[in-house]
Amino acid sequence: MPYVNIKITREGATAEQKAELIRGATQLLVDVLGKDPATTVVVIDEVDTDNWGVAGETITLRRGRTRAGGA
């Protein structure tokens, strides 16, 4: 039973986009590994940008700086 965990920042992914991620991940396991889609589990976790960090700072800070015209 394959288990796929997709983590994305919580920035407005639509239900349709998340459904496409689930379909795509499931199909990838079918195509590459021959897995049964009926037993393939896909979970999407949405993480607040305050709780996601890159290079020692939160995504909220990085995106805020970018939008403000900084580097």
Image: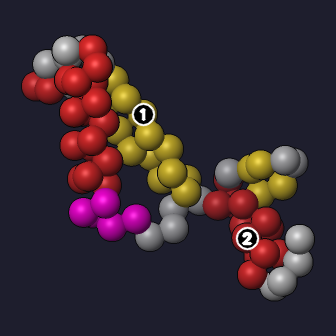
Magenta residue check for 14: yes
Q: Secondary structure at mark 1?
A: strand
Residue found 84% across the figure and 47% down from its top: 55
Task: Say above or below: 9 vs 7.
Answer: below
Q: Secondary structure at mark 2?
A: helix
Q: Is residue 41 visible?
A: no
Callout 2–callout 1 Cβ contact below 8 Å? no
Residue occupying the far left of the picture: 38
Tell me the kind of residue under disc 2.
Answer: Arg
Q: Quadrant of residue 13?
A: bottom left
Q: Badge 2 local density, few (<14 within 10 Å), some, or many (20+)?
A: some
Q: Is residue 58 visible?
A: yes
Specify whether 60 is left or right of 27.
Answer: right
Residue 38's mark? none
Residue 49: percent from the left, percent from the top?
64, 61
First to last magenta residue range:
13-17
Residue 52: percent from the left, percent from the top?
68, 51
Task: Say above or below: 16 vs 37.
Answer: below
Specify whether 3 is left or right of 5.
Answer: left
Tell me the kind of residue under disc 1.
Answer: Asn
Residue at image mark 2? 63
Residue occupying the far front of the picture: 31
Residue found 10% across the figure and 25% down from its top: 38
Locate the N terminus by quadrant.
top left
Specify whether 48 is left or right of 67.
Answer: left
Which label's residue is closer to the chain start, 2 or 1?
Answer: 1
Residue at image mark 1? 5
Q: Badge 1 local density, few (<14 within 10 Å), some, or many (20+)?
A: few
Residue 4: percent from the left, percent from the top?
37, 29
Q: Quadrant of residue 42?
A: top left
Coloring basis for residues:
secondary structure
Examine the residues drawn in magenta and state their main secondary structure.
helix
